[in-house]
Amino acid sequence: MRIEQHPILEFDRKEKITFFFNGQEMEGYASETIVAALHAAGVKELGKSPELHRPRGLFCAIGNCSSCLMVVDGQPNVRACVVKIKPGMQVELQSGKGDLK
Amino acid sequence: MINVEILIVGGGPAGLCAANAAADLGASVLICERDEIPGGQLVKQTHKFFGSRKQYAGDRGIAIGDFLLDEVINDPKIEVMPDTTVIGIYEDGLVLAERSEEIIKINPRKIIIATGAAEKFLTFPGNDLPGIYGAGAVQTLMNVAGVIPGERVLMVGAGNIGLIVSYQLAQAGVETAAVIEGAPTIGGYLVHASKIQRLGIPVRTGYTIKEAYGDGKVEGAVICRLDAAWNMIEGSEEDIKCDTICLAVGLTPLTELCWQAGCEMAFIRELSGHVPLIDKYLQTTNPKIYVAGDVSGVEEASSAMVEGRLAGYSAACSLGYGLDTAPSLQAGAMAELDELRAGPMSDRIRQGVEKVEKMVTKGGV
């Protein structure tokens, strides 16, 4: 959920754009990272762990920890916490380490 | 190949202050910052800082980041390279950085490593469920993206970060079920604790998280009491319904580049991990490399800014800049650090810094 009113901050979210999550059309704002847009839509699971296939979510949000790796426009291991959404971007859950094409 | 006098790795409070200080003495500076905008973690600090006026006390972290950035951007001696991650420092001092999937070579005369710290994790069953975040991640989501992490939070850790983030969650309209703290007392400043207690958020000392549970994401947590030896007390378990668990259990220095560059390192518990051995001018055992901020021991943004200035003066002075003015500027910064570390809340830091000093006089640097 997005914060609409805040006692200190104002959020300049820029224009609304459309991207895809596992093939499903979603809306976000141009200022948002992939995880911010997904969280705003209530999506917390970003992938599955390599061995036990346990769900993986966001942990550090600044590109340190690799918990949020996703497949973006066909490329695996993209840090969804620091990459911003773009119009038409295809974002997918990543299972394990991903495959290089 | 980019030739530069001083390369600063990291554009947070330490790196920006280092750049200003070095440029003030006349050195030319390049800042490599992995994010698209420098400022480090100041961008999400909506609370007002303590300390003295010199460290911008009374201003909010976000505003301090803006001041520092303005100074840097308006200084012709400083170049800022955003979206650029330094990935390697070679034996001969060559630095490699990655920008938009392109590798850049940098040949600096001196390097100031100001890479900051990373959040610590905690071991308990279910700790990998989506919905469990480091406290900094919650701040990034809320205060930078304007997105809330969930509806109801269990905060683990009552140090300053746990307390401040609980207050910030309330400002964003999110409920905090409880703040739990393993230690018998609240670790952070009481002024922060009082603010959240006034909101009705319980701070429960002597409690830890036993497990997190949920189907695919956090649905709740089991907390329990700890005895004086930090063992879980059986039968004291309590169920807390929450969709978010926020771990505010400290940070650890991000020292990969220091290791790579062959700086002598030591594990100093009081400084929260492995840190480079440094002298009082913040020079490491690799004479080309200085450090500033959390990378040399986890502390506060205010001390990171002062360390940044000190490292900036030292690095510039080592290249022959400001030979007449640098000594008094360095002494001033050292005195400010002593002042910041004088209070009883800084016992640990002082002990850590003293340990490093002892190791250094034994023949480190």
Image (spheres, coloured by chain):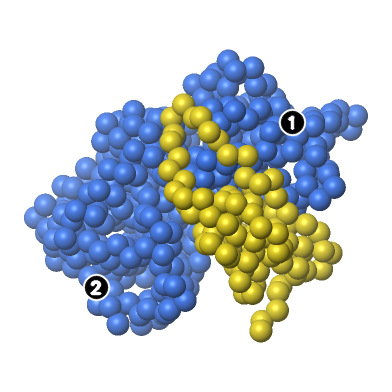
Chain colours: A yellow, B blue
Q: Nearer the viewer, residue A85 or B271?
A: A85
Residue sitting at the far right: B235
Quadrant housing residue B89: bottom left
**Label 2 or label 1, whichever comes before in sequence order:** 2
Instruction: Measuring from the top left, give residue B345's x and y in whole percent.
Output: 48, 31
User: On the rendered structure, is A66 left or right of B33?
Assistant: right
Disc 2: host chain: B
Type of amino acid under label 2: Val
Q: Quadrant of the N terminus of chain A?
A: top right
Distance of label 2 from label 1 (alpha carbons): 51 Å
What residue do we see at 27% from left, 43% from top?
B67
Type of amino acid under label 1: Tyr
**Up-down relation of residue B355 to residue B151 (above or below):** below
Disc 1: host chain: B
Q: Which residue is mark 2?
A: B4
Element on which disc 2 rests: strand
Instruction: Measuring from the top left, give residue A30's x and y in whole percent.
Output: 48, 54
User: Counting other residues with Cα less than 10 Å from the Cα at mark 1, is it few (<14), some (14-19), or many (20 or more)?
Assistant: many
Quadrant housing residue B15: bottom left
